[in-house]
Image (cartoon, grey):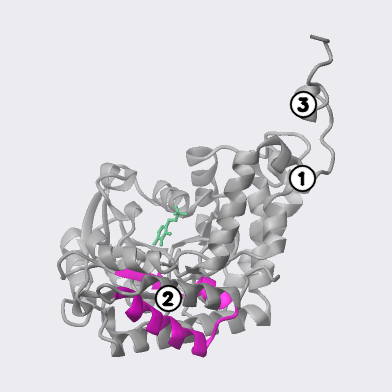
Amino acid sequence: MPLTAGVDEAPATEEAPGAPYGPDAGALRRQDPEIADVLDGEARRQEDSLQLVAAENFTSPAVLAALGSRLANKYAEGYPGRRHHGGCEYADTAERLAVERACALFGADHANVQAHSGSSAVLAAYAALLRPGDTVLAMGLAHGGHLTHGSPVNFSGRWFDFVPYGVDAESGLVDLHQVRALARQHRPRAIVCGSISYPRHLDYAEFRDIADEAGAALIVDAAHPIGLVAGGAAPSPVPYADVVCATTHKVLRGPRGGLLLCGDELAERIDRAVFPFTQGGAQMHTVAAKAVAFREAATPAFRTYAHQVVANARLLAERLAALGFAVTTGGTDTHLITADPAPLGVDGRTARARLAAAGMVVDTCALPYGDGRGIRFGTAAVTTQGMGAAEMEQVAGLFAQALREGAETGAVRAAVRELAGRFPPYGR
Ligand SMILES: *Cc1c(COP(=O)(O)O)cnc(C)c1O
């Protein structure tokens, strides 16, 4: 066999592993067709079904460009102007812009934009304010608390002594009398205010008052509503909390990542809690993408978006309630709805499966007082696509049709595909 056999077909990278990469959009398809197929399949999935997972959204092409940029190659441990690596001049500018924009957007003294995720932001807040073994008051997991609010399978439940508060059995609203009584009784070092599934505004002023009375720090985990706060469609926790933890990828519509906001007096402690205490090098492509998202979130268009997200969720909740769903708290103030489909004769798991079969993607969620599970969903992504009142009416009807026993799934699936097809998230 001649020595040159097969060389013509070999991909360039195998032939010359040290060769410079050309600007080649087709490189992934040629080099790794398996992963190229995955990415194509996922893009199709996102476009021909309805993304109703409450924590998801469609980032802008500008955010995606920053995420796919060469800042992904850069190591930048430390903070702007005091890095452990050379060559950080552009990384520094990206981070300074992200911090400045976050501070301006939320009216905060200080922002840390390096936390890799919402959970990393919460970990850093605990690291800054608590010691292992401290008592912390947080929403119980069955009532809507996050894993980082004391779950036994998470560092939080292992390292701290969590006391859970909950929602009222009748109204489904946070029981502030209980929160105050527990704070008086247990004298926690910190109170965590925030949830993965609570559809109403939280009373940050009241939580501040309770924390002050108990001598506790107030940590607001605003992972879900922070995007609504940015758009002026939900009250801000910033004036009340010692530290606000958040994500940048939910309603805020940025890259997957975390964010911390605090006053000047805690700035140094929060920064040190992120790096070097809980993380190494920042992901500078993500930091740049966060900067892009903060700039977008400061526009009038984003304010309109945030208000439309809430209007859509309110209407969807109202229509579903009229169709028989037991909507928690009777409605929503936010992008998020939780409901028990039991009155329609299905449990949460069955409902999620039937909705998925029809192309409507939702989560299940804990039901504080009911049996089994409910469903949790939101309007952040479909609103980014441009859907409004007429579409929410249609979605409510499709939910009910999909859940009907022995439903004609094919017909519902076709209607969902037609609806999604009219609102391509990245244009045609
Ligand atoms: C989403 C969420 C988080 C965690 O965010 P990740 O980026 O998934 O780690 C933390 N707390 C609350 C309340 C959340 O909703």
Q: Pointer 2: what residue?
A: 411
250 left or right, relative to 79: left
| Residue closer to the observer: 83 or 307 | 307
Main SS of the magenta segment?
helix
Q: Residues within 10 Å of mark 2 (few under 14, many from 20)?
A: some
Q: Pointer 1: what residue?
A: 26
Q: Is residue 152 highlighted in magenta?
A: no
Total numbered labels: 3
- Residue 411: name its quadrant: bottom left
245 left or right, relative to 149: right
* Residue 286 sits above or below residue 11 on the image: below
* Residue 187 sits above or below residue 27 on the image: below
Q: Residue at x 57, y 53 (%)?
A: 41
Label 3 residue SS: loop
**Residues rendered magenta in the picture:** 375-403
Q: Which of the two discs, 2 and 1, labels the residue nearer the N terminus?
A: 1
Numbered disc in front, either 3 or 1 = 3
Q: Amino acid at mark 3?
A: Ala
- Residue 342: name its quadrant: bottom left
Label 1 residue SS: loop
